[in-house]
Amino acid sequence: MSARLTFLLRLADTSLVLAQRLGEWVGHAPVLEEDLGLANLALDLLGQARLLLAYAGECEGRGRSEDDLAFGRDGAEYVNVALAEQPNGDFGMTIVRQVLLSAYQLEVYEALQHSSDARLAQIAAKAVKETRYHLRYAGGWLVRLGDGTAESHARVQAALDALWRFTAELFAGDAIDREMAEAGIAPPLEQLRAGWLRRIVPVLEQATLRRPADVPYRWHGRRGEHTEHLGYLLAELQYLYRAHPGAVW
Amino acid sequence: MVVVSAPRAAEPVWRVLEAIPDPELPAVSIVDLGIVRYVEWRGTQGPHVGLTPTYSGCPATAVIRATVREALQRAGYADVCLEEILTPAWSSDDLSRAAHAKLAAFGIAPPSHEVACPRCGSHATRLLSEFGSTPCKAHHCCTACLEPFDRFKCL
C-alpha cells in the first residue's frame, strides 16, 4: 500500500468514524437545535470522508469505490485516530471530543490547502470552511458548559480528563507522515501541535477548565490498532452492506 | 423520449439551468445559488456543465445532478457531461443579487453581514442555533416581532 493511500485513508476514516458517532445522536440530543447541529456536523464530515475515500480508491487503482472502502474493510484496516471512535458519553463528552478533533482537523486542512497534491488541496479548501464552523459551534458549547453550573462544569472536566490522553496520537508522525512531508503533500504532523494548542487553550481558559497533564502512552489508531469501541461502531455501520452485498437503495 | 438536436450555444443551456429550482430552497434556482460554474461545448459531445457542491455533504447535490441531466435531456441535449468542481470552494458570496431578494421574499434572511428579519425588517435579531433545517442555514429569532426565521449562513 502506498504512503499516499494510507495517508488519505487516515484522514477519511477519522472523518467517517466521527460522522458515524455524531449520527448516533440523531433523535437523542438534549434539544432539537442540537440534534440538528450534531447531524449537520456529521453530514459535513461524511461529505469530506466521501471525497477522500473516492480519491483513495482511485489512488489504490483496484477499482474499489468509496462504499467498498467504507463498508468492506475490517477494524484492523481502519486507520482513524482512536479519539474519533471514543463513545459519545453525555452531550458534554461529545462536545469535548468535537473541540479536540475539529481544532486538529482545522490545523490539518489549513496546511493541506497548500499541498503539492492538487486534488487533496481542493478537498482541504472545501473542508476548511466547514471545519472552522464546527470548531466555533463546539467551542461555544464548551464555554457554556464549562463556565455553566457546577454539574455541567464537573461533567466536561471529567470528559476532558478522560479524552486528553488520546490527543498525543494526533501529532505522533511516523514514516508515512515523513514521506508525505518530504513530498510536500502534507505538513510534518509534529509541527501542528503548537497551532492546535493555540486554538484549544484559550477555549479551555474561557470555559474555566483545567488542561490535563500529558501522558506518555500512545494509542495507534492510525496503524489500525484500535480501542475496543471501533468494532461495535463498524458492526452497525457495515451491517447492511455485508448482509446484502450489492444491495442498491 | 425523442431527442432532437439542439444548438451548440451556451446561452440556451443556461436558460434551462436557470429554470431548475434548488430542491431544498425552491424559491431560488441553482444558477442563483452559484452552483453552476460553467457551460462549455468541447469537441463533438454535448454540453459540459460544471457544478460545485455548497457543502461537502449536502444531500441535495445528488438530486441536483440528476435533475440537471434530466432537464437538459428533455430540452434536447444528449451526451450531457456533468463535472464536479471543488475549487474555488463554493461561498455564500456566489449568490446572485436576485437570489438575495428571492430568499428574503421566501422568508429566509440572505447571507449579508447585517441580519434583518425577513418578516418585519428589524435588525434586532438573535441567533437561536448555528444550524437550521439544511446545512446552509442557521436559525435566528426576531426580537421585535418575535418571529423565528432561517438565515442563509455566510460561508
Image (spheres, coloured by chain):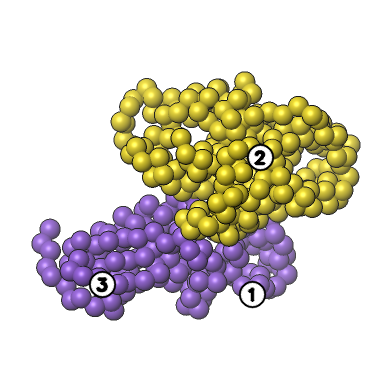
Chain colours: A yellow, B purple
Q: Chain of mark 3?
A: B
Percent position of residue B8, x then y:
20, 75
Q: Which residue is mark 3?
A: B41
Does the residue at mark 1 contact the one at mark 2 (Cβ under 8 Å)?
no
Percent position of residue A21, x then y:
59, 34
Q: Residue at x 71, y 45 (%)?
A: A190
Question: How many numbered discs sit on the rendered protein?
Answer: 3
Query: Helix or strand or loop: what does disc 3 sit on?
Result: strand
Check the image and report above or below for A87 versus B141: above
Q: Residue at x 44, y 72 (%)?
A: B32
Q: B24 or A137, which lies in front?
A: A137
Check the image and report above or below for B109 versus A43: below
Does the residue at mark 1 contact the one at mark 3 (Cβ under 8 Å)?
no
Q: A29 or A112, which lies in front?
A: A112
Q: Is residue A224 left or right of residue B62?
A: right
Q: Chain of mark 2?
A: A
Q: Which residue is mark 1?
A: B121
Q: Crowding at label 1, few (<14), some or many (≥20) Cα neighbours within 10 Å?
A: some
Q: Nearer the viewer, mark 3 or mark 2?
A: 2
Q: Is residue B125 left or right of residue A116?
A: right
Q: Residue at x 24, y 62 (%)?
A: B80
Q: Amino acid at mark 1?
A: Gly
